[in-house]
Image (spheres, helix red, strand yellow):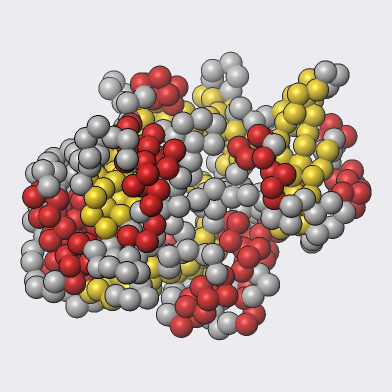
Amino acid sequence: MYAQGTLLTHFLAEAAQNRPHAPAIADATRRFDYRSLAAAAARIADALEDLGVRRGDRVILSMPNSVAFASSFWGILAAGAVAVPVNPSTKARKFAYILDNCAPRAVLADGDTAEEICTAMADLAEQIPLLTTATQSAPGPLDALLDRGEAQPLRRPDVIDQDLAVIIYTSGSTGDPKGVMLSHLNMTSAARSVASYLGYRAEDRIFVAVPMSFDYGLHQLTMAALTGAAVEAEPSFGQPFFTLKRLQDTEATVFPIVPSMVPIIAPLADRFDLGAIRLVSSTAAALHPSVIDRLQAMLPKATVFSMYGLTECHRCTYLPPEELEGRKMSVGIAIPNTEMWVVDEAGTAHHRNATGELVIRGATVMKGYWKNPTATAKRLKPGPLAGEWVLYTGDTCRIDADGFLYFVGRSDDILKIGGEKVAPIEVETTLIAHPEVTAACVLGEADPVHGQICVAHVETGTSVQALLTWCRDRLDPQAVPAKIKTYTSLARTQNGKIDRAVLASGQAATLQPAT
């Protein structure tokens, strides 16, 4: 039985009441049951209120995946404040922008990674209270709140489900990051929808190596509390051998991933017994068919869910596992309690047999971008009902006759080569199908003759000539890359996506081209 209520804190309060001694979250140093997690959150909420944090105030949360992150997240919400998760590897310049943009009342951070935060805060006219966990040399005030130990009830915050729960800043790959505003109702609706089709269970152990500062990682906390499941928090995927060892030792049953993790796992997977994993879900980018094949080969007992979404609405679609074999190129159907359609170049909406910009309608659609009405107006437009807003995603997609969606590309990314349209994802899919390619990113480059040309950045050990031959055998002439640049490793964002901005800027020379 899932938790009731439309406030996120209802999830944790009910789990603490109904399953007080059930495991809630563990990391390398701490293990909390649901009663302990709720008590730690309540103590953090009290500490925030002592610092002057009130309803609607923003509180930045910058920590690796951990018991401390989860306790702080729930504590911020219990104080009636808005959690602003920021990846702890964020550099000072971007952190300074976020500080200025959201004007937080307090910052909760990891003691060992707080240097960039302190640098960003140094020039502020008014200092913001900073509570940290321990460093290697000294205890931190947050640790005292986590480890105090006494039981304390989690009180209901003075908010309603229309109030903001979270602001998640996008990666900012095309400029300054935008703060996606998500209400309690947005977050609880998304958790219920996704947990229902994934089939999360109270006895599940969810191994979370994707950053909890990323919406998909954060929702593992909300879905776990909703269903009474346990979270195994892994700080990063930087040491894959040790991460897979812990994945094995925890006997985790659910493994959320992003596609870029698959080529890292593949060479090591057969060294470990991962047979306890019953479910693998993927998001952040569409799963290429070759990646699906690798996943199924690595984890033959696991059910694979390919999903697609944006921070602005969490998830858009999922591919039912029974459709996986016959529709590997599809990102699936709308998630429960969500409607989707595409709008063509003439402005006509279609629910079947059409290509256009994907539009999402439902309770998961964001409230807008924090302090950015121009960007908000571009994405949120009037829906079918008076006062309703729907999300224009900026993604070009195709819906087939059965209502299954196929991602074509970002509307701004479609290339026009010699008068012909070329979707980068088609070229990327072809390249990734090569047995010696682990990742690919295709970008456009201005050309005086053709208007644009196709440039492929490929993570591989094989030659450019071999890749060109491969593409010529499989792609229409206009889609064959005019240039292929190969690398031992492509740069990735904090959320595990290929960093297109780095490639487009030419800074990729630091990535040690293989050829």
Spot occupied by residue 278 in the image (x, y as percentages of width and height): 48, 73
Q: For this view, does 254 lie left or right of residue 414?
A: left
- Answer above or below: position of 491 versus 390: below
How many discs appear? Answer: 0
Looking at the image, residue 467 sits to the left or right of residue 213; the answer is: right
Where is residue 375 drawn, in percent x and y? 42, 24
Q: Is residue 2 visible?
A: no
Residue at image position (54%, 56%) is: 258
Tell me the quarter of the picture where residue 186 sits. top left
Q: Nearer the viewer, residue 486 or 278?
A: 486
Q: Residue at x 67, y 40 (%)?
A: 507
Tell me which corner region of the image, top left, top right, bottom left or bottom right, holds residue 414.
Answer: top right
Residue 259 percent across, percent down from the top left: 59, 56
Residue 448 is drawn in which quadrant? Answer: top right
Instruction: Note whether 25 is above or below 338 in the view shown.
Output: below
Residue located 32% across and 69% down the image:
137
- Residue 406 in sight: yes
* Location of the N terminus (image quadrant): bottom left
Specify whether 159 is left or right of 504: left
Q: Is residue 81 above or below residue 146?
A: above
Please tell me which residue is depicted at 24% across the width and 50% down the height of the picture. 130
Seen from the viewer's position, the closer of residues 323 and 104 is 104
| Closest to the observer, 44 or 347 | 44
Q: Position of residue 211 (x, y in %)?
A: 43, 57
Residue sitting farthest toward the top: 346
